[in-house]
Amino acid sequence: MSQILVVAGPTASGKTGLAIRLAKEYGGEVISADSMQIYQHMNIASAKPTVEEMEGIPHHLLDFVSPFSPFSVADYVKLAKEKIEEITKRGNLPILCGGTGLYISSLVDNIEFTEAETDFSVRNRLIQEAEEKGIVPLYERLQGIDPEAAEKIHPNNQKRVIRALEIFETTGLTLSQQNARSRLNPPSFTAYMLALCPPREVLYQRIDMRVDAMERQGLFEETKALQAMGLQRDMQSMQGIGYKEAFDYLAGKVSREECLEEIKKATRHYAKRQLTWFRRDKRYIWVDPTDEKNVTTAMEAFTWKNP
């Protein structure tokens, strides 16, 4: 059975740097597991690694989806499996690197997506209900029907809440029941899973520094260019932190300083949610990237057997 390495963790925790270090150590190639870095033309707020930052290490599933196109976790799992197979055949180590927990767990658990048919009458009724009453009553309904799924979905994630309710209404099965059925076949690889967690004060400082750097690199100019292409704030690709706040600044709804502070605040909250997600999975080995001894110990515990 082939092997993969996973480097997960919250935003700005140092995942890219460690993944590249591991790739150099073991002869690896990096597969991105970031739901925003997949999009073309969106480089700054997504913190997409530059060619220089990649240090010659091949990176996959970056910068390949049009921001006008839909892209699902099922799409990601299919493509990531293909990349793992290709990299393994080359005799190299696939290193999964990113902070989108749903992408990682769906791949590692070998979830086989059999998407329920979309029932637009049900979906539109739920959307209308959300518009009239807000998302809270729908989320509370999901908690009653499928508490396991509700725990994994953020209360403000209207799209996923509605989809979970739609699946139940159209199939009679909860999202958790469908996911359990999809895990019946084991994956074709074993995963050694690292999760980075620097001290909170260090993480928050890194987040603030990253947002300030985004402004210097041209976040607002990039967002203007995306607007000029025809992209709008409510599109799937624009839901990443940084872009939607920049849209509000460009629309004159907030000042530049308020916009940057909101991005920092939203990113800190997102980092907390990421940590909560990864801590639920007991397979992760936690690493403090600011402690070199801790990093070295985690690396030495991994045994790479070239296929």
Image (cartoon, rainbow, N blue to C red):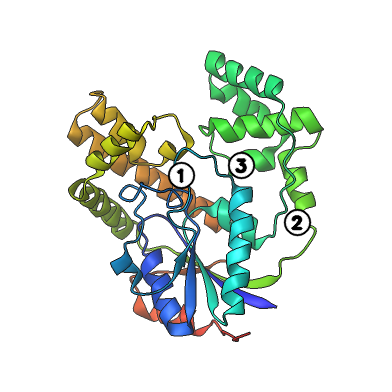
Image quadrant in which the C terminus is located? bottom right
Q: Crowding near pointer 1: few (<14 within 10 Å), some, many (20+)? A: some
Quadrant assignment, res 88: bottom right
Q: Locate residue 31, reporting x and y percent.
A: 50, 65
Dot 3 or dot 1, earlier in sequence: 1
Q: Which residue is mark 3?
A: 151
Q: Are marks 1 and 2 in contact (CB under 8 Å)?
A: no
* Structural distance between the alpha carbons of marks 1 and 2: 30 Å
Q: Which mark is residue 66?
A: 1
Q: Which residue is mark 2?
A: 183
Q: Is residue 261 left or right of residue 146?
A: left
Amino acid type shown at disc 2:
Arg
Amino acid type shown at disc 1:
Ser
**Residue found 63% across the figure and 71% down from its top:** 85
Instruction: Establish if 186 lies above or below 209.
Output: below
Which is in the foreground here, disc 1 or disc 2?
1
Q: Is residue 25 left or right of residue 70?
A: left
Secondary structure of the residue carrying tag 2 is: loop
Quadrant assignment, res 193: bottom right
**Residue found 61% across the figure and 32% down from its top:** 161
Q: Locate residue 122, reporting x and y percent.
A: 70, 22
Q: Is residue 121 left or right of residue 240?
A: right
